[in-house]
Image: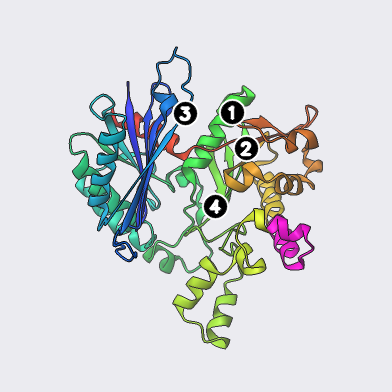
Amino acid sequence: MSVVLVVNSGSSSFKYQLLDMQHEQVLASGLVERIGDPSTGSGTGGTATHTVKAAALAAPDAPAPAVTDATYTIERVIPDHTAGFAVMLEAFAAHGPSLDAHAPVAVGHRVVHGGARFFAPTVVTPLVEINIDELSVLAPLHNPANLAGIVAAKKAFPDVPHVAVFDTAFHQSLAPEAYTYAIDREVAEAHRIRRYGFHGTSHKFVSEAAAAFVGRPLGELKQIVFHLGNGASVTAIEGGRSVDTSMGLTPLEGLVMGTRSGDLDPAVLLQLARRADMSIADLDTLLNKRSGLKGLAGVSDMRDIGERRDAGDPAAQLAFDVYIHRLRAYAGAYLAQLDGVDVISFTAGVGENSIRVREEAMATLGFAGVEIDPERNARRERGIRRISTDASRVIVLVVPTDEELEIARQTLSVAT
């Protein structure tokens, strides 16, 4: 059995999954949060939630157990990521699966920003750690936390390879005309100002899953993938390679998101700095935390937007209309960049679950051969499914993403 542990570290938390890669099944998953936070009434500073997937532990030919998973919670002070990994190991020892019987052959780590240096899954060495740290200037909220998780995980699992899988790597195939901003070249080069793109593991996973589902070689397909969650991006993919994507230097550019603005006239920031006396910190907070759906309607969840629209809230209606307008704009742009498209896929929380978003986003693409089947689109089913009609020249799919599985696959590809 080839077992891989996948870790996604934040500044005060980390998520993990233990995967049996022979069957591509989750054996256990967990979340360690409130790392470094001692401020609770009980004096406990952290919480670790550990879920054992009992069904995945059953023998392949055995009937599925009555309970498919069991969840356990540990509360205690967790001062840093190293202590967090100790709690994770304790959970495995107490509740299983046994790491003696299911020892990881490698640990895969999500790293948000690889700059222009990393274009493939990379075994972590001291030099790689230095590079991830140095690239923190491009992702100050993410790379330091990702690196903290790597350092702690290497202490917990010192005898197996650790692999960094970068969100930006899939987009390293962008051509210069796609990633270059039209600003002074020397300034851009000095400060590494260019478009990098994000959600790469999701876009890669979904485009490959879509090709397998439609039964055509990945290399001959033109695809558009909408990753619509609280963070949202869209990518044009030709022959399995990213040729254009909506996010840029940071995950702020592009689509309207839960709390992020997406595309914006840069002069808006100059105007607010001059006329509203807003500082750089103020502008950062505005664009990342007080914009998008939340800025327009007061709520960031598309489900809440839908409820308020149905109740006649004009702010929610406008927020939805702006959201859809941006989706259609990018769909049209990428149809032009690709010179037509074979498959369009929706993934992530909004993309997989919002019937109305998918319907409205595709409503104006009849000229391109897109024809949505209302009944198929309205079904709430698990797994990949087609929502376009049989007569539609473009196949439109809902494809549940699995970034952890994609990280595990990439980890295994270079670690063994």
Q: Which residue range is magenta in the image? A: 305-324
Q: Which residue is mark 4?
A: 178
Q: Tell me residue 213's x, y (percent).
A: 61, 25
Residue at 41%, 27% in the rendered image: 54
Q: Tell which tag, 3 or 4, sits nearer the viewer.
A: 3
User: Hey, which quadrant is residue 101 in on the image?
Assistant: top left
Q: CB under 8 Å between callouts 2 and 3?
A: no
Q: Badge 1: few (under 14), some or many (20 or more) residues near its Cα, within 10 Å?
A: many
Depth check: give the residue in front, 190 or 259: 259
Q: Is residue 376 left or right of residue 213?
A: right
Q: Secondary structure at mark 2?
A: strand
Which of disc 1 and disc 4 is earlier in sequence?
A: 4
Taking the view exactly as shown, the residue that stands out farthest to the front is 42
Q: Badge 4: few (under 14), some or many (20 or more) residues near its Cα, within 10 Å?
A: some
Q: Secondary structure at mark 3?
A: loop
Any magenta on residue 362?
Answer: no
* Three-letter code for the amino acid on which mark 3 is drawn: Thr
* Three-letter code for the amino acid on which mark 4 is drawn: Ala
Q: CB under 8 Å between callouts 2 and 1?
A: yes
The Cα atoms of the two marked residues, 3 and 1, are separated by 30 Å
